[in-house]
Amino acid sequence: MRIATWNVNSLRARIGRVEAFVERHEIDVLAMQEVKATYDQVPLMGLAGLGYEVAVCGAGQWNGVAIASRVGLDDISEGFPGQPGWGEPVAPEARAMGATCGGVRVWSLYVPNGRKVHDAHYTYKLEWMARLREAAKPWLSEPTVLVGDWNVCPTDDDVFDMAQFRNSTHVTPEERAAFAALLDDGYTEVTREFAPGYTYWDYYRQRFERDRGLKIDFVLADPTVASRVVGASIDRDERDPAQGEGAPSDHAPVIVDLRD
């Protein structure tokens, strides 16, 4: 089975790229983040024609997650137990969706950015990750993957220039500890061994062309799924403005291959 995760930065704007991507790579399950749309706003006929069922958890122009699967899409959950909220009034955002696809429980996750250290959104981010950890502990008893845009660089090697990120979000000890806690509980990040390199490049100052990026998109698997991983890759072409039709997302898709 081939699972991919991709922050598409607007599914409506990127739907043609998504269709071409899943067909080119023969993706079985694609978890998407920052879809910025509700289900009714996304043109899904192309994906349906390719044999995909699609579930979207979105509220409009912000956030949003989705899962497209051609191997089943069952037991869909919008949000995880205990997921904290944000906004006025405070309510859970469209940042998490789970579904069972081909016997694997797939969670598409869009971790809050945090904005700035000491900002209320940074506190929200840490609480969100802590609540996710608690919710995810029981999931270790079944085939599960936690995939998506984590907005955390777990190591200094995941940042193009640490000097530019001192006292910034994504690299603080607290964020890294929150990510590491999931690994301590038994999840394995399964892409790094096979797919070194960045997954995100800001549109600013030709960051992609100069390879000044961040590694923030990851796949965490329970022990049973981790034992099935035979490879992983980052499709940099999907971030390349010179490739494909239309403007690219600022993230590249990450692909993981599982043996049957």
Image (cartoon, helix red, strand yellow):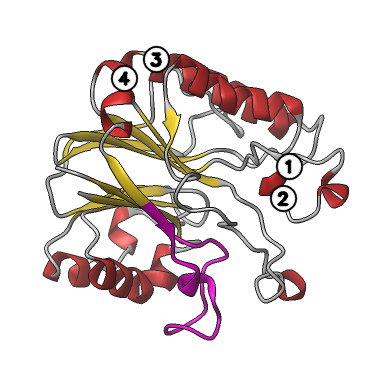
Q: CA distance from mark 2 to mark 4?
A: 30 Å
Give the residue pinned by disc 4. 139
Helix, strand or loop for the magenta stretch, by majority = loop
Say few, some or many: other residues with alpha carbon within 10 Å of mark 1 (under 14 / 14 to 19 / 20 or more). Answer: few
CB under 8 Å between discs 2 and 1: yes
Contact between labelled residues 4 and 3, with CB atoms less than 8 Å apart: yes
Give the amino acid at mark 3. Answer: Lys
The mark closer to the camera, 4 or 1, is 1
Q: Earlier in the sequence, mark 3 or mark 2?
A: 3
Which residue is depicted at the point 67% across and 76% down? 209
Image quadrant assignment for residue 226: top left
Tell me where the magenta segment starts and ends, as one range: 232-255
Q: Is residue 163 left or right of residue 186?
A: right
Mark toward the start of the polypeptide (2 vs 4): 4
* Residue on which disc 1 sits: 156
**Are the two marked residues, 2 and 4, in contact with CB atoms closer than 8 angstroms?**
no
* Residue 61 appears anywhere in the view: yes
Q: CA distance from mark 3 to mark 4?
A: 5 Å
